[in-house]
Every structure is written in C-alpha cells, then in structure tokens.
Image: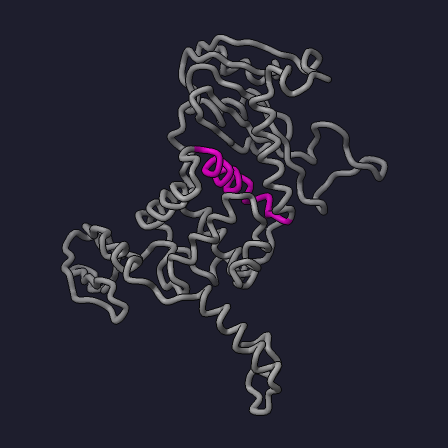
C-alpha cells in the first residue's frame, strides 16, 4: 500500500510486518467484495428500458462474472446492467460501503472525518458527496407546505475572496456578502430550503422560490419581512407576525419563532462542519439538509430510502468530469 514505505521491501522488520498485516486487515474489512445480498438487490431491479437509449426492446443476456444480470438492447446494441447510468455504475467499492458513509453524513460528520473513519481518500468522500447531490437534485420540487407554516430566511457568507469591503472592513448586517436561503417548516413536519440567489430577499426572489411550495389559504407565521407580503397577497394566506423587536432577548422556550430558529441552528451547524464548500453548490447542500431533517427519522430507514432512490435515478457521475474541474469560487 502506498502509505507504507516498506511495503515492497523484502527485508521488512518484524514490527513492519506486523504493521503491514494489520493495515491490510483493516483495509480488507472496509473494502469487501460485493455480497450475495448486494447482488440480489441489484438483480431485483426490474429493467424495462435501455439506460443508454431508452428503448423497450431489451432482452436478458446472461450474467457478468460478478453474478449481476446482463441485458442487451436490440436497438443501440449495448449491453448493460441495473447499475448502468446510476451513481453506482463502474463502482470499485461495493454499495454496502455507502451505508457507513451515509450514516456519518446524516449524523452531520464532515467529509474529512467520514473518509478517515471509512479509510477512504478525501477525494473519494468528495466524489461520493457529488453523487449524493446528483441523486437529491430534484428532491424538493414537489414539496408543498400547508396549515401553519413558519417562514424565515437564513444567510450564508460568500466565499472569503469575494467579500466586498468598505474602508477595509466587512459590510455589516444583511449585505452583498451574504446569500439568502428561504427556509420554511409546517406543523405537519414538512421542510423547505430554497436558495434565493440574492443577498436581500425581494418580492421577485421570494415569489420565485416559494410560489409552488405553499398551499393557497395556509397560515404564515413569520417576522414581518417585507417580501413575504407577496405570498400573503397572491396565495390568500392569513398571517401571524412576530417582529424582531418583539422576540429579541426572549429565551428559546418563550420565543414563538423558535421552531424555525432551531432549524436554522441545525443547518448552520451542518454547514460549519463543511466550511470549504463551494457556494455554487449551496442548493445541493440545502437539498441534503432537507433530506436529513425529513422523514423517516430512523437513520437506517433513511439510508434505505437513499439507496433505493439512487438505484432508480439516472444520475451517472463520472470522476473526471466533476473532480478535475477548478474550484469555481
């Protein structure tokens, strides 16, 4: 192994032999071959179309040496399997390795600490995160909040080298150094996190972000932000307003906006653990936070949901396409 300088030496000391064998045992335990259960899961996916061209003229064509079923398309003449055109295509590590990775991710671990625990390279953790983003890309599209809805904005800083300074000092308050995210929660347990692509919310940005996610006639509980008015007018919402002046200094238990404030705290804590994130990917991060906070609460059920989403999503992500690009910040 490349991180053992004596690995290829024929004159290893006894202590080096011990270290080598132990590290190999660790690696083998963390990088197993695909199990029968995994092959069974993959083969259970019903294939109705060719993932390459979409044709329905496909036939079963034996199995690969791994035991995974092979199919053949009579139109484009390509062979494929149930993993073709998914995030698991061309995998070198079995799907089972994703279980621990996802568990750490859903528990707010950083990518670095998760990679260390899984004995994977940091680049693997980052690559897998991009795959997670791909699977969850449209996850909030059909979210509809109703009943009593708490609404507020949370703000994330632009990357440091893009900060705007005045007289050598950072701009204070809500400024162009911030990115606004509309965040909402209803008492039925539904969440919403939409990046507004602006620093200060406006009627236009708020309406664009939320118009298709709030049910007409719902009741809005908010801080009186001016841009919320367009939702109230166009969607015939009722409202309860708690201004910042009213809630300032109140303890959490006495603050009527605590439900949304608590969500903000969790989201910001999660993002702080990933401080070097690309701001262009902020909506992807919000989709991930939505998935973590949404039902099911049980982490194993959540992992089960993700794996099944990933198996059904046409979201192939090539390493060279996403990991060789320069940082867009």
Q: Which residue is pictured at 42% across the width and 38% down the height?
A: 298
Left or right: where 61 falls relative to 154: left
Does 293 appear in magenta? yes
Left or right: where 194 falls relative to 5: left
Left or right: where 144 falls relative to 118: left
Give the quadrant of residue 89. Answer: bottom left
Range covered by the magenta-colored residues: 276-294
Residue situated in front as seen by the camera: 192 or 14: 14
Q: 248 above or below 264?
A: above
Residue situated in front as seen by the camera: 42 or 16: 16
**In the image as oriented, which residue stretches furthest toward the bottom?**
11
Does 124 appear in magenta? no
Q: Position of residue 294 (x, y in %)?
A: 44, 33
Q: 138 above or below 99?
A: above
Q: Position of residue 310 (x, y in %)?
A: 36, 48
Give the quadrant of residue 14. Answer: bottom right
Which image quarter holds the N terminus? bottom right
What number of labels is visible?
0
Q: Which residue is pictured at 47% across the width and 59% down the height?
A: 321
């Amino acid at each position: 192994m490349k991180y053992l300088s004596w690995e290829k030496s024929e004159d290893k000391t006894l202590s080096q032999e011990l270290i080598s064998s132990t590290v190999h045992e660790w690696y083998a335990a963390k990088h197993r071959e695909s199990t029968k259960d995994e092959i069974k899961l993959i083969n259970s996916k019903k294939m109705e179309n060719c993932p390459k061209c979409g044709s329905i003229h496909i036939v079963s064509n034996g199995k690969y040496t791994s035991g995974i079923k092979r199919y053949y398309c009579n139109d484009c003449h390509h062979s494929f399997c149930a993993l073709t055109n998914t995030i698991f295509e061309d995998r070198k590590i079995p799907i089972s390795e994703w279980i621990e990775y996802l568990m750490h991710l859903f528990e707010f671990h950083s990518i670095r600490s998760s990679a260390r625990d899984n004995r994977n390279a940091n680049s693997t953790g980052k690559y897998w995160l991009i795959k997670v983003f791909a699977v969850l890309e449209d996850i909030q599209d059909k979210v509809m909040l109703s009943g009593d809805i708490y609404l507020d904005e949370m703000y994330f800083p632009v990357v440091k080298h893009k900060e705007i300074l005045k007289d050598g000092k950072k701009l204070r308050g809500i400024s162009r150094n911030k990115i606004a995210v509309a965040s909402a929660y209803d008492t039925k347990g539904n969440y919403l996190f939409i990046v507004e692509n602006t620093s200060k919310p406006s009627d236009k940005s708020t309406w664009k972000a939320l118009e298709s996610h709030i049910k007409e006639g719902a009741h809005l509980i908010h801080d009186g932000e001016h841009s919320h008015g367009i939702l109230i007018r166009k969607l015939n919402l009722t409202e309860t307003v708690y201004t910042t002046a009213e809630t300032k200094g109140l303890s959490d238990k006495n603050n009527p906006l605590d439900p949304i404030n608590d969500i903000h705290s969790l989201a910001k804590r999660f993002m702080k653990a990933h401080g070097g994130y690309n701001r262009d990917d902020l909506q992807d991060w919000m989709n991930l936070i939505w998935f973590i906070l949404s039902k099911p609460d049980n982490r194993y059920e959540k992992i089960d949901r993700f794996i099944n989403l990933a198996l059904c999503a046409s979201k192939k992500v090539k390493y060279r396409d996403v990991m060789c690009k320069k940082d867009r910040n």
